[in-house]
Image (tube, helix red, strand yellow):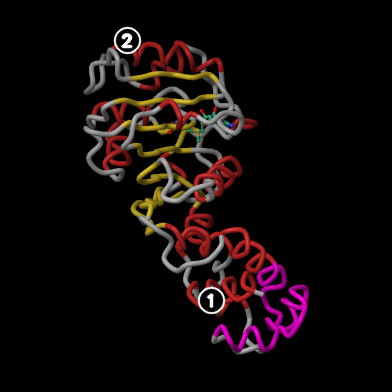
Amino acid sequence: MTALDGLPPLRQVIAAHELTAKKSLGQNFLLDLNLTAKIARQAGDLSACDVLEVGPGPGGLTRGLLAEGARKVLAVEKDARAMGALAEIAAHYPGRLEVVNADALEIDPLAHLTPPIRIVANLPYNVGTELLTRWLTPKVWPPAWESLTLMFQREVANRIVATPGSKTYGRLAILSQWRTDARIVMELPPEAFTPPPKVHSAVVHLVALPEPRFPADAGVLSRVTAMAFQQRRKMLRASLKGLGGDVEGLLEEAGIKPTARAEEIGLEPFCALARLVAAR
Ligand code: SAM
């Protein structure tokens, strides 16, 4: 039996290549090709784009991306066991899939792609947030990529799109929303995966803004928000003491009440504060 794309169904691929899921690699596979095509569509029209996929595993999402018309996919997978399955997909789509057997945290594959570039991935939680942070903090902005379409644990997805006053609002929201338009575009229950993880998942689509939403130095903004959110329930005049000098005056100049707490403060006042700190 073959699937819609003419390749064997994923269950058969996994059995043939003995790809039993490894917990240490965060392997929870998507086997429904309708679902992977739907995730691929969240990245928009890919026909004129090179796509970086991190963590293809047996290739469910890779097949979704190719079937949806991606010009080229570069897939970076740490698990050598998946290479055989991925080679079969590459043979089925001549010249459109390149596979690299590597740890995505150790290499920078973006340099090998031709713009416009979009990134799509279903990654383990810890690797996903680390890569997201790296992709959001390149040396120059705008970055090499146009958009990121990434699967996260729902709790992490909520942190990315959180607004001031919510429990999940913090540094990840500020970093993401400073430089991108970020929204949750799909939610998936544990049963969508094999084996099912303990938690729900969500796909976040982040589109790079041509320039950050408000001017600020990335390093200073990061330092100020790290200090502010270290003790998120503390008043800012206390949590930002480490900045030295007249912290209350600085906060007031940035339009922030010194008695306010980090979790209540929006992106714009944080950027104003970062500019004042940088200017001192
Ligand atoms: N994309 C496939 C899917 O949707 O069915 C697999 C998703 S599974 C959640 C995560 C994949 O990322 C696994 O194939 C795993 O081996 C791979 N992976 C984990 N850590 C990685 C890393 N540091 N670099 C590259 N791939 C990694």
Query: Relative to 158, is 279 above or below?
Result: below
At mark 2, the secondary structure is: helix
Mark 1 vs mark 2: in front: 1
For disc 1, the neighbor class at 10 Å (few under 14, some 14 to 19, many from 20) is many
Task: Estimate the x, y position of residue 214 in percent, counting from the top left.
Answer: 45, 69
Residue in the picture at 41% in, 57% down: 180
User: Which of the labelled discs sits on residue 91, or is there none?
Assistant: 2
Figure quadrant of the N terminus: top left
Residue annotated with mark 1:
272
Residue placed most toward the observer, 111 or 11: 111
79 left or right of 230 in image? left
Query: What amino acid type should be assigned to the residue bearing mark 1?
Result: Ala
Tell me the quadrant of the picture where the C terminus can be found.
bottom right
Q: Are marks 1 and 2 in contact (CB under 8 Å)?
A: no
- Residue at point 55%, 26% (across, down): 21
In the rendered image, residue 150, in percent from the top left (x then y), is placed at: 43, 44
Q: Secondary structure at mark 1?
A: helix
Distance (Cα) linking label 1 and label 2: 53 Å
Q: Amino acid at mark 2?
A: Ala
Q: Nearer the viewer, residue 157 or 94?
A: 94
Mostly what secondary structure, the magenta segment? helix
Q: Position of residue 110 (x, y in %)?
A: 45, 32
Residue at 23% x, 33% y: name it: 48
Q: Report which quarter residue 87 is drawn in.
A: top left
Residue 216 covered by magenta stretch: no
Q: For the magenta stretch, what is the residue range?
A: 227-254
Which circle's residue, 1 or 2, is located before the other in the chain? 2
